[in-house]
């Protein structure tokens, strides 16, 4: 389980996107677009580069239809509850 300590929504429209940081200081990029929710974490060697070639895709799931792209934080928490923990995070 990856503990999320900071979550910043970077896009209020479609697609929903967040920049997120875990307890180890690694950045995590989250995007919900075309019905797919994707969570990618930066490598330990490049903790501020969640989209780099060494990044780790930790969650991918089709949870909506091809026209879905809007999600709020509570939906995000529900969808990723098996891999991410949002307890004690700051906004």
Image (cartoon, grey):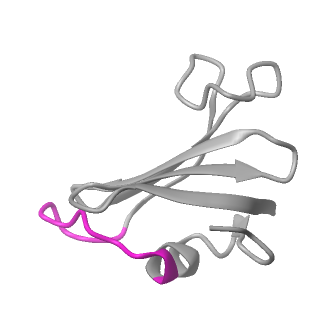
Q: Is residue 42 above or below residue 35?
A: above
| Rendered residue at 71%/68% (across/down) | 90
Q: Which residues are magenta?
A: 63-74
**In the foreground, 83 or 27:** 27
Position of residue 32 measured from the top left corner of the image (x, y, whole percent): 35, 58
Residue 37 shown in magenta: no
| Rendered residue at 67%/32% (across/down) | 42
| Rendered residue at 69%/59% (across/down) | 6
Q: Name the main secondary structure of what is drawn in magenta.
A: loop
Quarter holding the N terminus?
Answer: bottom right
In the image, farthest residue toward the right? 24
Position of residue 52 measured from the top left corner of the image (x, y, whole percent): 56, 20
Image quarter of residue 41: top right
Left or right, residue 66 beside residue 49: left
Left or right, residue 30 beside residue 17: right
Position of residue 15 measured from the top left corner of the image (x, y, whole percent): 26, 55
Left or right, residue 21 beside residue 68: right
Image quarter of residue 36: bottom left
Quarter holding the C terminus?
Answer: bottom right
Q: Is residue 79 above or below residue 41?
A: below
In the image, farthest residue toward the front? 91
In the image, farthest residue toward the left? 67
Position of residue 66 measured from the top left corner of the image (x, y, whole percent): 15, 60
Count of marks overlaid on the render: 0
Left or right, residue 3 beside residue 65: right
Residue 69 shown in magenta: yes
Q: Is residue 19 above or below residue 64?
A: above
């Amino acid at each position: 389980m990856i503990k999320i300590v900071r979550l910043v929504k970077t896009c209020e429209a479609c697609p929903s996107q967040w920049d997120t940081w875990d307890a180890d200081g690694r950045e995590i990029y989250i995007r919900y677009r075309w019905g797919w929710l994707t969570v990618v974490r930066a490598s330990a060697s490049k903790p501020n580069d969640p989209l780099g070639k060494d990044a780790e895709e930790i969650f991918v799931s089709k949870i909506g239809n091809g026209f879905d792209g809007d999600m709020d934080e509570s939906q995000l928490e529900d969808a990723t509850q098996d891999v991410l923990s949002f307890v004690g995070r700051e906004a």
